[in-house]
Image (cartoon, rainbow, N blue to C red):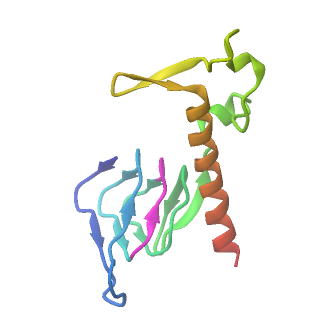
Amino acid sequence: TSILQGVTLGGTGKEAGDRHPKVGKHVILYDSVSVLGNIQIGDGAIVNAKSIVTKPVPPMAIVSGIPAKIESERSFPEEEEGHSSDVLDDNDRNEDDTIITSGSVDGKKKTKEIEKVEQLIMRLSREQWKNSVAR
């Protein structure tokens, strides 16, 4: 996550309890952005300079303006390459039926199954956000 100069993360004063925004992983908040209220900025989102964000931002979206609106949405790298990450297939397993591993987290191997579940969670959170905005 990158937060450039002059960014404000704050409550609106109208909410009780948890009032401040939640910023996801790999987010970029450019100069003089204001993010106000108990809202979520989704993973990989980009908020352009001098924008005022008062509503949740979906993962991988690019927003700008006053108030901030979605300018475009990007895909996750696996979706761009045409890979389906919803289910495991036989190519993801060794002969002894163990799952082939790839990637590394804190020196430990991460299985393809875990990677695929993470991708599915990100996709579902984006769809949930879209459904909540459509209401």
Q: At 33% from the left edge and 28% from the top edge, which residue is drawn?
A: 106
- The prevailing secondary structure element of the residues shown in magenta is loop
Q: In the image as oriented, which residue stretches furthest toward the right?
A: 90
**Residue 57: image location, x then y, percent:** 51, 63
Residue at (64, 72) in percent of width and height: 132
Tally the numbered discs: 0
Is residue 44 placed above or below 107 in the rendered structure?
A: below
Q: Nearer the viewer, residue 47 or 19?
A: 19
Viewed as shown, does residue 107 lie left or right of 113?
left
Split into 4 quadrants, where in the image is the C terminus?
bottom right
The quadrant holding residue 80 is top right
**What x and y, as percent, mark residue 86?**
72, 39
Q: Identify the residue at the far top of this view.
A: 95
Q: Nearer the viewer, residue 50 or 63?
A: 63
Q: Decide if residue 121 is on the left or right side of residue 37.
A: right
Query: Residue 30 occupies which quadrant of the picture?
Result: bottom left
Residue at the location (33% across, 77% down)?
A: 18
- The picture places residue 45, in percent across and down from the top left corner, at 48, 52
Q: Is residue 113 above or below residue 59?
A: above
Direction from residue 93 to residue 101 in the image, left or right: left
The image shows residue 96 at horizontal and vertical percentages of 67, 11
Q: Is residue 1 positioned above or below 40 on the image? A: above
Q: Is residue 43 highlighted in magenta?
A: yes
Q: Please give the range of residues in magenta.
A: 38-45
Q: Residue at x 54, y 49 (%)?
A: 60
- Based on the picture, tell me whether residue 8 belongs to the magenta stretch: no
